[in-house]
């Protein structure tokens, strides 16, 4: 009974978020979210989870129950990422950039990403898991191609 109530709460929350997302005004190029002082778009945790759920649904064709479960996993992961990045930004604003260990941060990110992938694969069928893995590989190939294209001098290494 408790599981049913929890599941219904998640489904209702997801439905209400979807309806609210449709009522939000769009930005100058149809983007959603707000822009920060540097002009970059800032996505809320809910926006990120909804957007990624929709992308995964397009790739693996999720059932309604799977949509709710995937959203819950992605929301939790987006929230954790948001908290982690807030800590990094706070350190940077205080001028504590010397103590930042990029390699350790990257390792933590990869660990969180692997946990997310495992949680999603537990929700997917075997066919969906295979389609998801293929999609992830295609995305990684696109990222690598973009990195190679940037190395032409358009953008230097990050410090």
Image: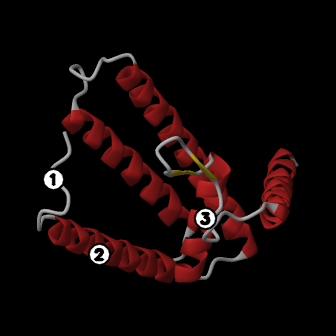
Residue 122 placement, left or right of 93: right
Numbered tag placed on residue 90 in the rendering:
none
Residue 64 placement, left or right of 138: right
Residue that numbered label 1 is attached to: 156
How many labels, in total? 3
Residue 42 placement, left or right of 25: left
Query: Is the C terminus in the top left, top right, bottom left or bottom right quadrant?
Result: top left
Residue 85 x %, y %: 44, 35
Q: CA distance from mark 3 to mark 2?
A: 19 Å
Q: Which callout, 3 or 1, points to the residue nearer the camera?
A: 1
Residue that numbered label 2 is attached to: 142
Mark 2 in CB contact with mark 1 (< 8 angstroms):
no
Q: Residue at x 32, y 18 (%)?
A: 95
Residue 21, by quadrant, is bottom right
The furthest residue to the left: 152
Front residue (pair 114, 84) = 84
Residue 139 placement, left or right of 154: right
Residue 130 x %, y %: 41, 79
Q: How would you rate the neighbour count of disc 2 (Cα within 10 Å): few for under 14, some for 14-19, many for 20 or more?
A: few
Numbered tag placed on residue 51 in the rendering:
3
SS for callout 1: loop
């Amino acid at each position: 009974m408790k599981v049913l109530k929890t599941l219904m709460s998640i489904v209702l929350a997801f439905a209400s978020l979807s309806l609210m997302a449709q009522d939000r005004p769009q930005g100058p190029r149809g983007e959603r979210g707000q822009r920060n002082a540097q002009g970059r778009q800032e996505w809320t945790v809910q926006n990120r989870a909804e957007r990624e759920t929709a992308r995964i649904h397009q790739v693996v064709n999720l059932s309604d129950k799977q949509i709710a479960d995937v959203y819950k996993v992605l929301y939790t992961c987006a929230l954790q990422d948001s908290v982690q990045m807030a800590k990094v930004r706070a350190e940077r604003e205080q001028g504590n950039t010397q103590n930042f260990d990029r390699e350790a941060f990257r390792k933590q990110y990869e660990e969180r990403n692997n946990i997310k992938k495992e949680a999603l694969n537990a929700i997917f069928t075997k066919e969906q898991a295979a389609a998801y893995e293929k999609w992830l590989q295609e995305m990684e190939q696109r990222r690598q191609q973009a990195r190679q294209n940037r190395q032409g001098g358009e953008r230097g290494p990050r410090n």
